[in-house]
Amino acid sequence: MARSRRRSWRVRLAAVLLVLGPGLVSGFADNDAGGITTYSLVGVQFGYDLLWVILVSQVALFFTQEIGARLGLATGQGMTGLIRDRFGVRWAAFAALAMLVANLGTTIAEFAGIGAALELFGVPVPVSALAAAVAVVTLISLGSFSRVQYLFVAVGVAVSIAYIVSAALAHPDWGRAAISLVVPHGQLSGAYWLAVVGTVGTTITPWGQGFIQAYVVDKRLGPEDLAAERLDVGLGSFITNLVAGFIVVACAAAIWAHGGVFDANTFTATQAARALQPLAGTAAEILFAVGLLAASLLGLGVVPLSSAYTACEAFGWETGVEWRWREAPAFYGLLALFVGFPALFVLALGPQQLVPVMFLSQVLNGLLLPFILVFVMLLSSDRRLLGPLASGPVLLAIGWVITIGLAVMSVALVVTTVLPTG
């Protein structure tokens, strides 16, 4: 009897492990070049004041990603494919365009992160951009997706540990950090709202919504996997924001608390590396460069893939990494395009422009996100489409509050930018 129970437990555990992936990979990829840069800038400029945004983002990320996963589990279709079937080609094209614009900015940020990281080792930006583009396309198109998935997660774990240890060794003001985590702080200026939108935009992203749904479909998961996928999403969102919080704390304790001078237009990777000095000392730049490079490659493997999913689903083309080049030429051709064009764009940037580009790409994510979430919420309430996996009254209420809140936040950014409050 005991042996039978142990065997049953192992079977259930194996079933859960087979489902894990979409939420974890999407979560880890959120802490990419744009994420690390944004959280670093927030910690250096505002100290602990914006930690409350991290907490709110964690809650919102779980619910939005959970909805995306349910859409994939119930329908076996990607987001823009569902929008096309439910609302027509024009709305699908609109949603795809919004996502692709946001994804383009994020992919440019990944190349900027690679350029900033390798520049610390003396590698010219053109060389790093070309090498990264070729490596990522080759990895995705020739490797099995399961191997790519575990590589993404392993890289995410390595990057996360470095910042967690660094934050702990920086001797931060944990009391102030705890208060800022639950009580909003700061002056409501244009710079403040820019940082808020950037922080949310690097945590809850348009590409993340499309990616998790497409990934669930690509793994051929179904309604019976809902419980395991919710665990997957929960772990991914928790770890994502835990690491984000530690990055903010590390930068606040190592730079902001010591009166570090901040200028968003001249802030460099070298300055951001100071947050890792409690862990690495004089080798902080090297550790930061390795972490930023790994995070950038992680995002560069995921975001263009999400773009290819989005475009192919909108037009009904074959999509998925299990297909070969000759079986899905449009998918792989678009993947190469979504990697190649941002690489060429980054070639025109100077060293001082790399960090601002990474930050502003996350602000663009935050501004475009509400448009995508409106479609997500409308689809999630359709019982004819989702059946028992459709959102109930409570989940719908939470989802719409998040969507409306993000829209208000975007409007607040525009208003405070046009009419500064301080």
Image (tube, grey):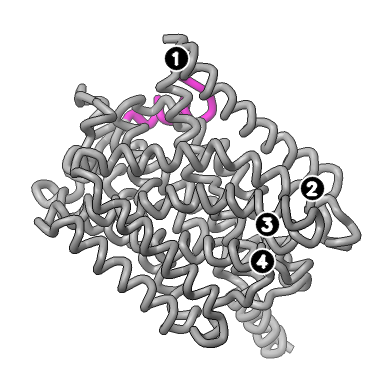
The boundaries of the magenta stretch are 173-189
Dot 1, how many residues are within 10 Å of its Cα: few (below 14), some (14-19), or many (20+)?
few
User: What's the distance in space between the residues labelled 1 and 4, CA to CA?
Assistant: 46 Å
Residue of label 2? 378
Of callouts 2 and 3, the N-terminal one: 3
Viewer-side label of 2, 3? 2
Identity of the residue drawn at 44% across and 19% down: 190
Identity of the residue drawn at 37% across and 59% down: 341
Of callouts 2 and 1, the N-terminal one: 1
Of callouts 2 and 4, the N-terminal one: 4
Q: Secondary structure at mark 4?
A: helix
Residue 262, given in percent of the width and then of the height, sits at 24, 26
User: What's the distance in space between the residues labelled 2 and 3, CA to CA?
Assistant: 12 Å
Mark 2 in CB contact with mark 3 (< 8 angstroms): no
Residue 214 magenta-highlighted: no
Question: Which quadrant would the N terminus be assigned to in this image?
Answer: bottom right
Going by the numbered disc 3, the residue's amino acid type is Gly
Residue 176, given in percent of the width and then of the height, sits at 40, 25
Residue of label 1? 187
In the image, is residue 301 above or below residue 277?
A: below
Going by the numbered disc 1, the residue's amino acid type is Gln
